Image (cartoon, rainbow, N blue to C red):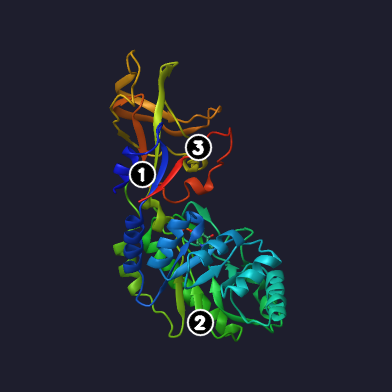
Amino acid sequence: MTPADALRHADRPVSAYVYSRAALRSAAARVRAALPPGATLLYAVKANGHPDVVATLAAATDGLEVASGGELALAIAAGATRIAFGGPAKTDQELHDGVRAGALIHVESILELRRLDAIAARLGLRATAALRVNRAVAGPDGSHRMTGTPTPFGIDEAALDEAFAVPLRAVDLRGFHLHAVSNSLDATAYAAFVAGAITWSAATAAAHGLDLRYVNVGGGLGVSYTDPSTIDLNVLRERLAAVPVPPGVDLVFEPGRLLAADAGWYAAEVVDLKRTHGRWFAVLRGGTHHFRLPAAWGYSHPFTVMPMDGDEVWPWPFDRPSVEGVSVDAVGELCTPRDVLARDVPVSRVRVGDVLVFARTGAYGWDISHHDFLRHPHPQLIVV
Ligand SMILES: *Cc1c(COP(=O)(O)O)cnc(C)c1O
């Protein structure tokens, strides 16, 4: 079934996410083709933790990156062959479970390194780990910066001497985790960041007597939310092909957004059409409690109108409200003027009962939204 067919058969009034396994697999293949041969591709589960999405991408990539005990449990249930475990506030229980699961731990602080060593020793196991470092220099431009600036993530580059002085009994330290950016759209800058990450890791490992076997450059491969472009994967492939990877080093990428974004559609039925103070509003069975990203980032998410017809769509004896050739604000059902998905969007026609379909919502859509504000029913989650 296609995503559009699934929406045509969705429960009414329509309020649904559709995720496509085929689209997830093709995104994984496209990203894989842009990476250097032999590089490792993990999926960052936080972009979309739906169990079917996680299982599909676990099979289509080399494994999963998780950032909580909940995501770790999802990754284990999905049968991931490799798991990397990050996150700045891991509890003792989470470290324990991560070590037991054989996950490679991205260590976010010196205290965490000491706790990990003690926990692995107590289990009689050897933990594999990499130090997450907040480097002195910033990564490429994007929507958020995680490095080269004060953040709660990773160990400050200036504190690495202290980190390497921690006596380790039960941790096999393999290298570094250098996730630096979110939603980078500049393939040339991203490739330069990868090259710099490898050079920096080799020099830093040599300076501290570390046998370097792991360089994780994180995620951050971007998609545009205002036009159909993404980071240019052809340019990325060409530029990355020229980056030397030292022998024996596992170069790891862990994107979330680019793997999941185009595999999801959010759809919401128009339940009312109204004009106040000269402005048209399409009021939806849904809103920012299902899809928070446009409100969080302050942009209008593009949509298409899916016309719906039939007696079950319009059972009433009175006229069905309809507007043509106007601009509308697509707003949700919450009692706040901030519940806006898109503003001032020209539509050729929209009627009550039609469905607005927001593409590119498979990543950071449902997962980051405040589901229970106002206690409306959750959207249907449909996987095709
Ligand atoms: C969020 C995150 C990712 C995924 O980032 P995308 O921008 O979705 O590619 C990867 N690694 C870490 C450590 C993250 O926090």
**Residue 125 marker:** none
Q: Can residue 256 be seen here?
A: no
Label 3 and label 1: CA atoms lie apart by 15 Å
Name the residue: 63% across, 69% down. 97
Residue at x-position 46% and y-position 69%: 63
| Disc nearest the viewer among 2 and 1 | 1
Viewer-proximal residue, 342 or 82?
A: 82
Give SS at disc 2.
Answer: loop
Which residue sits at x=55%, y=60%? Answer: 71
Residue type at mark 3? Thr
Give the residue number, with chain letter if any, for mark 3: 288
Q: Is residue 107 left or right of residue 56?
A: right
Three-letter code, disc 2: Arg
Query: Can you give x and y, in whole percent of width and height, for residue 198 in the image?
Result: 47, 75
In primary-sequence order, the first of circles 3 and 1 is 3
**Residue 11's x, y, as percent?**
40, 36
Across and down, in percent, residue 263 comes to 37, 52
Taking 281 as reference, is 373 above or below it? below
Name the residue carrying label 1. Answer: 359
Between 107 and 286, the one nearer to me in the picture: 286
Instruction: Give the residue at the far top of this rendering.
Output: 318
Q: Is residue 269 left or right of residue 174?
A: left
First in residue order: circle 2 vs circle 1: 2
- Label 2 Cα crowd, 10 Å radius (few <14 / some 14-19 / many 20+): some
Q: Earlier in the sequence, mark 3 or mark 2?
A: 2
Residue type indicated by callout 1: Ala
Q: Residue at x 72, y 77 (%)?
A: 118
For disc 2, the marked residue is 213
Mark 3 beta carbon near ligand 1 (under 8 Å): no
